[in-house]
Image: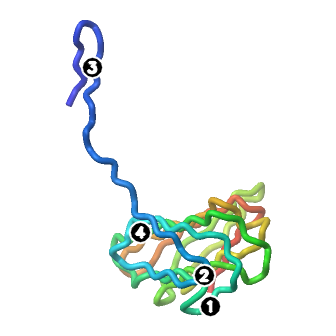
Amino acid sequence: MSNQIIDGNVQIPRWNGAIVMPNTINAVENALTTVTVAQSGSIIFCPQSTHNPVAGGANTINLPAPSAGFNLRIIFIAAGDGTAGHNWDITSTGANIIGSSVAVTAALAATDIAGATTITRNAVAADALPGDYIDLYSNGTNYFVFAYSAGAATPWATA
């Protein structure tokens, strides 16, 4: 639809469509969050961790098996508390997490991620800041990861 000019004034048509917002998931600290393929396109918000990750439990986000087109953003809404081990783990079913993480610092530190089963956001307070995020995209075989942090060094580790 084009704009109309009436009496020298531009008339801009109104859009009456709905704004579609992504689904949001609030991860619960000291609990397991399992993501399904149906939740593709969602945003997960993670609070500050005050517990150590436990396999299949505390502070763990389990990804579904890779599925073509699956995508997810994980946003950390609090800084790390500086306690060793108070991390968040993002896990996959196999060594299929590939990509890179970037810490935007004067040195622009980067960490390559190649064939990992777990990405960990470390709780070092100077490195893990509110707003750090991980984007995950799947081609059906692997997860491609782009992680960002404004911390002093990259807070991401892999296993």
> Which residue was labeled with disc 1?
54
Image side of residue 134 versus residue 67, left or right = right
The first of marks 4 and 2 along the sequence is 2
The residue at the point 67 percent across, 67 percent down is: 110
> Which residue was labeled with disc 4?
71
The residue at the point 27 percent across, 19 percent down is: 11
Amino acid type, residue under disc 2 in the picture? Asn
Q: CA distance from mark 3 to mark 1?
A: 59 Å
The foreground one among 50 and 53 is 50
Residue 136 picture location, percent across and down: 48, 70
Asked if the residues shown at circle 1 and circle 2 are in contact, with their CB atoms under 8 angstroms apart, the answer is yes
Amino acid type, residue under disc 3 in the picture? Gln
Amino acid type, residue under disc 4 in the picture? Asn
> Which residue was labeled with disc 2?
59
> Of all residues shown, which one is farthest toward the left?
1
The foreground one among 139 and 49 is 49
* 25 shown above or below 140: above
Asked if the residues shown at circle 4 and circle 1 are in contact, with their CB atoms under 8 angstroms apart, the answer is no
Packing grade of label 1 (10 A; few <14, some 14-19, many >=20) is some
Residue 134 picture location, percent across and down: 55, 67
The first of marks 1 and 2 along the sequence is 1
Amino acid type, residue under disc 1 in the picture? Val
Image side of residue 110 versus residue 113, left or right = right
Q: Quadrant of residue 69?
A: bottom left
